[in-house]
């Protein structure tokens, strides 16, 4: 179950996933890189998920199945399952995706001395929900990741030592497990992104991570529409956003000094959670200074990007639109 002495464990957390589970398990079992174990941890499913996994356990001795006695939720379930693994490396799988057959092999070739390896996931749907595939290399600088996850959890391969670098008692910071892993790995500047499709990511409305894609094309009408929408979101949500970002500030403050990137991110969060108008202006100045690190893809420090960065303390409200009670569009 090893290649070059390095074993890989796969972690899959399930909850009512019987519709698509077989396809995903089959894609993991077909990997060109031998997988040492597959740990499936179920969070009290009420459908046929358990029966399907137990069927696979009977056929494949390296599949381990754990059923939680009570609901744990996404973050505790994933971190608990990851700590049950025995492999040097851990690959994370969603219950309803389909892996490319050489996903693990490509990532093991790419990870080197890094803590985390991610790659592209290509969305697909069998239910007709809106999808969009962005093939730009995502910017995973910490200044970006404190606001929005940039490394898809269902593509991640991590060195298990990353788990030991997470500050104690910080697995629930209003952020999903993949953002937490990504922030810590990037704090140590040990992330590699593989610009290849690794996962076929099923999109359906029941998925915990699904949201309708937004139109970010840079037409004049779209720019004004986004400015108007984000301004209204900012007015409604600015206090709630501060409360959401405080745990992230506490989390990263524990890593202060690890790298200059961390210190800058902590400064950004400190300014954002402040209610001082002066700190708002300081945050705008910091955003303009780092305008090449704030957006989806790393871009040059052009006049347009500086202008976008100046507005970023307001426009980032878009990332918290799920908190809105006004259904702002």
Image (tube, rainbow, N blue to C red):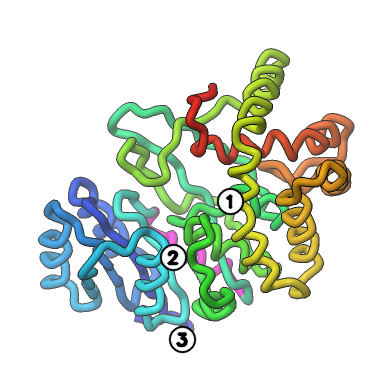
Give how far across and how far down residue 15 sits, in percent: 25, 55
Give how far across and how far down residue 109 sits, in percent: 54, 69
In the rendered structure, find residue 187 and report the number of the disc placed on it.
none
On-image quarter of the N terminus: bottom left
Tell me which segment is drawn in magenta: 100-112
Towards the viewer: 36 or 52: 52
Give yes or no for contact between labels 3 and 2 (Cβ–Cβ under 8 Å): no
Above or below residue 312? Residue 186 is below
In the rendered structure, find residue 244 and report the number of the disc placed on it.
1
| Mark 3 lies on residue | 5
Q: CA distance from mark 3 to mark 2?
A: 15 Å
Crowdedness near tag 1: few (<14), some (14–19) or many (≥20) residues, C-alpha within 10 Å: some
Q: How many marks?
A: 3
| SS state under label 1 | helix
Secondary structure mostly taken by the magenta-highlighted segment of the chain: helix
Left or right: 284 in relation to 233: right
Above or below residue 162? Residue 175 is above
Q: CA distance from mark 1 to mark 3?
A: 42 Å
Towards the viewer: 245 or 276: 276
Give how far across and how far down residue 119 sits, in percent: 54, 54
Q: Earlier in the sequence, mark 1 or mark 3?
A: 3
| Residue at figure coordinates x 10%, y 61% from the top left | 51
Above or below residue 327? Residue 294 is below
Left or right: 315 in relation to 119: right
Q: Is residue 138 visible?
A: no
In the rendered structure, find residue 104 and report the number of the disc placed on it.
2
| SS state under label 3 | loop
| Residue at figure coordinates x 63%, y 57% from the top left | 246
Q: Earlier in the sequence, mark 1 or mark 2?
A: 2
| Residue at figure coordinates x 69%, y 34% from the top left | 315
Foreground label between 1 and 2: 1
């Amino acid at each position: 179950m090893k290649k070059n002495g390095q074993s890989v464990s796969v972690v899959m957390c399930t909850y009512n996933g019987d519709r698509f589970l077989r396809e995903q398990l089959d894609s993991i079992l077909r990997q060109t890189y031998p997988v040492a174990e597959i740990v499936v941890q179920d969070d009290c499913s009420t459908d046929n998920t358990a029966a399907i996994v137990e069927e696979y356990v009977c056929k494949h001795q390296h599949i381990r199945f754990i059923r939680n006695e009570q609901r744990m939720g996404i973050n505790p379930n994933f971190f608990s399952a990851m700590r049950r693994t025995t492999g040097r490396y851990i690959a994370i799988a969603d219950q309803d995706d389909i892996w490319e057959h050489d996903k693990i092999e490509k990532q093991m070739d790419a990870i080197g001395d890094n803590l985390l390896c991610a790659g592209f996931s290509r969305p697909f749907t069998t239910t007709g929900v809106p999808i969009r595939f962005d093939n730009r290399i995502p910017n995973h600088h910490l200044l970006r990741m404190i606001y929005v996850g940039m490394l898809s959890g269902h593509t991640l391969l991590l060195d298990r030592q990353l788990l030991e670098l997470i500050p104690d008692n910080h697995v629930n910071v209003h952020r999903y497990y993949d953002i937490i892993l990504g922030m810590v790995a990037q704090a140590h500047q040990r992330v590699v992104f593989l610009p290849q499709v690794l996962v076929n990511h099923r999109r359906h409305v029941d998925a915990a991570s699904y949201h309708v894609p937004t139109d970010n094309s840079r037409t004049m009408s779209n720019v004004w529409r986004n400015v108007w929408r984000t301004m209204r979101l900012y007015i409604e949500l600015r206090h709630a956003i501060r409360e959401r970002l405080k745990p992230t500030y506490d989390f990263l403050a524990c890593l202060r000094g690890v790298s200059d990137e961390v210190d800058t991110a902590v400064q950004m969060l400190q300014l954002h959670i402040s209610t001082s108008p002066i700190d708002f202006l300081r945050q705008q100045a910091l955003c303009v200074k780092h305008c090449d690190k704030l957006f989806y893809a790393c871009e040059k420090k052009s006049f347009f990007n500086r202008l976008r960065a100046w507005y970023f303390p307001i426009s980032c409200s878009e990332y918290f639109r799920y908190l809105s009670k006004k259904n702002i569009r």
